[in-house]
């Protein structure tokens, strides 16, 4: 019921906003992600995440293109190291903001729970540079934000729990201390057509590999997603909230969402992502200050299964994610739901 109501709200937001065809070179993509473990009837570990992102049209230049706001072009001048340019590439800029929160299992205890994960929040903004063809995508991103009370994770959780009539967590005084956070991320994706899906039934596979470097997270990752269904979009799949995961912008001119006609599609997907982590601030604790910390598992994997609906300019997706144990002493793995809404305009 919760998912269905949210889907209806998102669909109504975009009602009546379509009509004529869109050009791949002029189309912005807005993405909204909402994740919560209430979809798995729990309230612990990675307990909530929200992210908004905007993917630009195909750009001639990250610095001089007039379709970008002036302040964005000024920022891009300082990030030229991340710009990639070559003939035949479609270039897109991704701007994102988000917040994530983490809690231990026992919400009633106000003392430091030494054998469970720390309370933590992460508030961030990201700039990403995408270079892609129809079957390859390279993403380079820089995320800058803050961990600790300045992330307002405590206040955000209290607000939602008061609104919903849920009990509040009592141990936020033990959360990680304020620390500026930075993460430089790279990810490469390859798309393999298992059956032509430009029209009607199709299936494909999308592999990825990459990594992150920074005080928030340092890791190497790789994985794969497979999709099967009707009128699969010409993008690079559906990801949960993670760096390098803004895949839903069209990468092909035949994407059904670019048509002003009554385009629709429906497909199922499954994916896996494995990470070898050298650092995770949400388990290792603050970098330069004393804080709560717990021994992390060096290898963590996520498996996801979900469904995506395409209707005109909208892509609406839901996935259930299953994560292996992240730290020593954790009783079992964790599961949460990921709902994403993508709109092309």
Image (cartoon, rainbow, N blue to C red):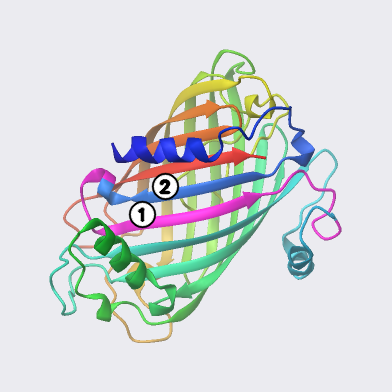
Residue pushed farthest front? 16
Residue 257 visible here: yes
Residue pushed farthest left? 108
Disc number placed over residue 87 in the picture, else none:
none
Tag 2's secondary structure?
strand
Query: Quadrant of the rendered structure where residue 101 is?
Result: bottom left
Disc number placed over residue 274 in the picture, else none:
2
Query: Quadrant of the rendered structure where residue 2 is?
Result: top left
Mark 2 and mark 1 lie on one chain; the one further toward the N terminus is 2
Query: Residue shown at 28%/44% (left/top)?
Result: 39
Write down the region rendered in magenta: 39-64
Q: Disc 2, disc 1: CB below 8 Å?
A: yes
Please indicate whether residue 196 sits to the left or right of residue 25 in the image: left
Query: Residue shown at 16%/77% (left/top)?
Result: 110
Residue in the foreground of this view, choosing between 66 and 79 = 66
Residue 251, x across and y down, in percent: 68, 35
Disc number placed over residue 299 in the picture, else none:
1
Looking at the image, residue 31 lies above or below residue 96: above
Residue 195, x across and y down, in percent: 57, 15
């Amino acid at each position: 019921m919760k998912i269905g109501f949210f889907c209806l709200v998102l669909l109504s937001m975009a009602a009546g906003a379509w009509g004529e065809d869109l050009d791949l070179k002029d189309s912005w993509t807005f993405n909204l992600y909402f994740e919560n473990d209430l979809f798995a009837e729990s309230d612990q570990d990675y307990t909530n995440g929200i992210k908004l992102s905007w993917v630009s049209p195909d750009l001639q230049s990250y610095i001089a293109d007039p379709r970008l706001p002036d302040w964005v072009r000024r920022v891009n001048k300082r990030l030229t190291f991340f710009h990639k340019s070559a003939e035949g590439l479609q270039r897109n800029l991704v701007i994102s903001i988000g917040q994530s929160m983490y809690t231990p299992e026992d919400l009633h205890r106000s003392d430091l729970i030494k054998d469970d994960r720390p309370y933590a929040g992460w508030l961030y903004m990201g700039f990403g540079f995408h270079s892609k063809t129809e079957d390859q995508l390279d993403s380079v991103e820089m995320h800058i934000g803050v961990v600790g009370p300045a992330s307002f994770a405590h206040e955000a959780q209290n607000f939602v729990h008061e609104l919903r009539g849920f009990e509040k967590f009592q141990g936020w005084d033990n959360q990680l201390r304020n620390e500026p956070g930075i993460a430089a991320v790279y990810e490469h994706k390859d798309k393999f057509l298992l059956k032509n899906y430009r029209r009607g039934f199709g299936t494909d596979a999308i592999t990825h590999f990459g990594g992150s470097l920074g005080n928030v997270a340092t890791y190497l990752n790789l994985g794969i997603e497979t999709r099967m269904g009707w009128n699969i979009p010409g993008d690079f799949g559906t990801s949960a909230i993670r760096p390098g995961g803004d895949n839903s912008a069209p990468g092909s001119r035949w994407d059904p969402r670019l048509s002003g006609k009554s385009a629709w599609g429906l497909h199922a997907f499954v994916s896996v992502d494995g990470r070898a982590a050298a650092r995770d601030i949400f388990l290792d604790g603050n970098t330069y200050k004393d804080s709560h910390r717990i021994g992390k598992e060096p290898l963590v994997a996520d498996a996801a299964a979900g469904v995506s609906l395409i209707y005109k300019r909208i892509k609406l997706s839901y996935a259930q994610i299953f994560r292996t144990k992240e730290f020593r002493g954790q009783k079992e793995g964790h599961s949460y739901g990921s709902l994403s809404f993508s709109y092309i305009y």
